[in-house]
Amino acid sequence: MHRIPLILLLCGLATPAPAQAPPACTPVREGTVACLSGKLCACRFIRGGSLTGQRDRHAWDCGILRPACGTGLVPPSLGQSQPMPPPSLFLQVPDRRER
């Protein structure tokens, strides 16, 4: 009976640590880069507008055109050209002499 509170206490201590928030993108940090979620994000000024519903602000640019970093990099072995195997299909062309 005394083991149940001990087990519950140990389960509570085994939870993972909370994720760290990315550094704040401020005018002082404009132009700096940081590796966030496998992307090399840049801190830059983003214009707002009435169409987007956003105000002018500094924010991290982690768009699709940004390069990968950290664990998101492609392994070097995948960048090498490997010979592509031929397709496994055989097309039979009908002989015109049979007609």
Image (cartoon, helix red, strand yellow):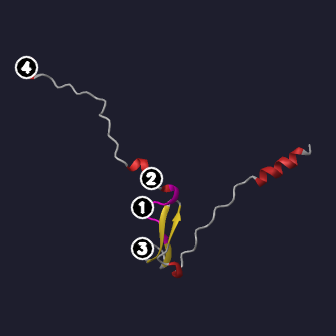
Q: Which span is picked out in magenta?
A: 60-71
Q: Which residue is mark 4?
A: 97
Secondary structure type for disc 3:
loop
Report which residue position mark 1 lands on: 64
Q: Residues within 10 Å of mark 4 (few under 14, many from 20)?
A: few
Disc 4 + disc 1, Cβ < 8 Å: no
Instruction: Give how far apart the Cα atoms at labels 1 and 2 are.
Output: 15 Å
Q: Does the rendering let one see residue 61?
A: no
Q: Nearer the viewer, mark 1 or mark 2?
A: 2
- Mark 1 touching mark 2, by CB under 8 A? no
Q: Which of the pair 76/21 is nearer the observer?
A: 76
Report how far apart the C-alphas of labels 3 and 1 lie in the structure.
Answer: 22 Å
To which residue does mark 2 refer? 74
Q: Secondary structure at mark 4?
A: helix
Q: Quadrant of residue 2?
A: top right
> In terms of sequence position, does the residue under pointer 4 or pointer 1 come before the other?
1
Q: Amino acid at mark 2?
A: Val
Q: Which is more N-terminal, label 2 or label 1?
A: 1
Q: Quadrant where the N terminus lies? A: top right
Mark 2 or 3: in front is 2
Query: Judging from the image, what secondary structure is the residue with disc 2 in?
Result: loop
Mark 2 surroundings within 10 Å by alpha-carbon count, few (fewer than 14), some (14 through 19), many (20 or more): few
- For badge 3, the amino acid type reads Leu
Q: Residue furthest top?
A: 98
